[in-house]
Amino acid sequence: MPSSRRTRVALLLYAFCSLYLLPVFPHFLSANELTRWAAVAGLVDRGSLDVAWATPLIGPPMDVARHGAHLYSNKAPGLTFLSVPAYLVARPFLGPPTTGNLRWSLTVMRIATVTLPGLLLGLLMARSTRDDSFAVVSLLFATPVFVFGTLYFSHVTAAALLYGAYLLALRAPVEPHPLGRAALAGFLAGLAVVTEYPAALGVVILGAVLLFRPDRARRLAAYVVGGVPWAVALALYNRALFGSFVSISTANEAAANLAAQNAHGIFRVAWPTWLGLSTILTSPSRGLLFFSPVLVLGIVALVPRSRRAPDAWFRFLFVLLLVVAMAGYPMPSGGWGVSARYLILALPFIVEAAHDRGIVPGFLSTSLLAFSVVLCVVPALTFPLAPDFFRFVHAGFSRPLLTAGFATPNLGSFVTPGLVSLLPVVLAAGVALAIGGAGSPRRTIAAAVVGVALAAGVVFAPVQDTPMERATRALFLDSYFRPEDRLGALARATSDPAERAQLEELRTLVPATRCVGPDDWPYGAAAMPVARPWNDGPDGRWRDPSPLP
């Protein structure tokens, strides 16, 4: 099969998986996603970005900034405004927001503003690498792009925008229209920043590297002019919501623990620590290179070979400084999730570096690709947002949830909500792996078998659960899957009075949790809880204070 056709098939497989999976879970209040959803719906339906209106639907909004009596999303505003057209398209068909249609409006917005940019990111990689199917499959199936391309998070969108700006500024031919391309690069770079603030690091480095290009003064000026509209828009947004042109949302955190992080370093970034570095690179919980060891090939290739290679110098400096910055972040794990989501911005540059250094499918590279595909696809098959205290995400979180039948909602759920509905995604990932490792059939198969077997060893490894991990899995299954009083069973089974008391406290949260958020589709419910009033506890958490019968 010609390389261009293999690449097109890989892109279609990624699009299929991202459209097929519908990871909006019943009653799960995804703080990162729902605060944006509430802002978009509030803007369209109420003419206000205040998200407090959504409390009856999603409970007290989390991940919010406070200014006066108002609550706003604490996220960069770019994805919110990019989502407005998608919400406007869906609104006449879905009607006003309810717990029954919330997932569908959010999914339409996610497809338009995250999945499509993820597909664009793959297209840009294919173009930059001249249809290198190994590079495209590595990026889309063997990194966190696979999981986060199905979630309403901004990382994939910002990565596509920043990578597009980089290609225009440093990889496109000098002629024709160099100033126009520089201005468009600045426009995309500015949009990347207002979509994900850490992209500013790449934008600054890109501007600095332009100083070493021909006609540097005019190119840099065009680049800056291209980004000015977004800088003005962000300043006006800050002024309207937070009273100052330079007061961004994260400087107005409503949650005390997040507000305290503002005193940590500069823009929350301090000196890197070994713990932060190991967390984002090597840990089984969040390590980028643990989930995606195929990226080691690109990491090694990042060091420039020539002083006259501005694109290589940009890749090297940006990846290095982003890793150092995130290693000094107060919460490098990124909270609930998989792999190092804060490093998604760097992924296309690492993959491109591997291609430029001549990495092609071989036994080692295909084995690493197979290992990475398995470890990046498996978390997407069930609840993908593992709390950061799970030490082994695959064996201690994803596998037990899948064993319990907790499959990610998907298009196949209309026919069967069980694990069988996930087979199309597993098959698509397998075909993508075969395309990425295309070469000698025997060697490709042998390498893929080795990589899959090693990854299976990670997924099925015996792990010793902590009480917190057991309780959290039971809480998730009772709250977001089917309520079968798993927490009560754990409480009755333990002989530790303190652990029993903690389990009983968690048990009281289930009925209140199941009164808000997206409805029970596609799982139904074994027993519907009675709605009970929400009360604000002394620690700021909302809960149902009454004991279960």
Image (cartoon, rainbow, N blue to C red):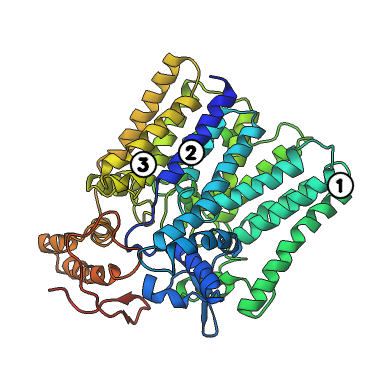
Which residue is more in the foreground, 451 or 166?
Answer: 166
Which residue is more in the foreground, 533 or 539?
Answer: 533
The answer to whether 544 appears left or right of 436 in the picture is left
Q: Residue furthest front?
A: 92
Residue with the mark numbered 3? 378
Q: Residue furthest bottom?
A: 69
Which residue is more in the foreground, 263 or 121?
Answer: 121
Where residue 200 is drawn, which disc sits there? none
The type of residue carrying mark 1 is Arg
- Residue displayed at 79% across by 48% down: 182
* Percent coordinates x, y for residue 516 in the rendering: 33, 70
- Residue displayed at 41% across by 63% down: 102
State which mark lies toward you, 3 or 2: 2
The type of residue carrying mark 2 is Tyr
Lower sequence index among marks 3 and 2: 2
The type of residue carrying mark 3 is Val
- Around disc 2, counting alpha carbons within 10 Å, would you say few (fewer than 14), some (14 to 19), or many (20 or more)? many
- Residue 498 image-quadrant placement: bottom left
Local SS, label 3: helix
Q: Are marks 3 and 2 in contact (CB under 8 Å)?
A: no
Residue with the mark numbered 1? 216
Lower sequence index among marks 3 and 1: 1
Residue 32 in view of the camera: yes
State which mark lies toward you, 3 or 1: 3
Q: Report the Cα–Cα distance between label 3 and label 2.
A: 15 Å
Q: Report the Cα–Cα distance between label 3 and label 1.
A: 46 Å
Lower sequence index among marks 1 and 2: 2
Q: Are marks 1 and 2 in contact (CB under 8 Å)?
A: no
| Placement of 238 over or under 341, stated as above or below | below
Residue with the mark numbered 2? 14
The answer to whether 446 appears left or right of 259 in the picture is left
Quadrant containing the C terminus is bottom left
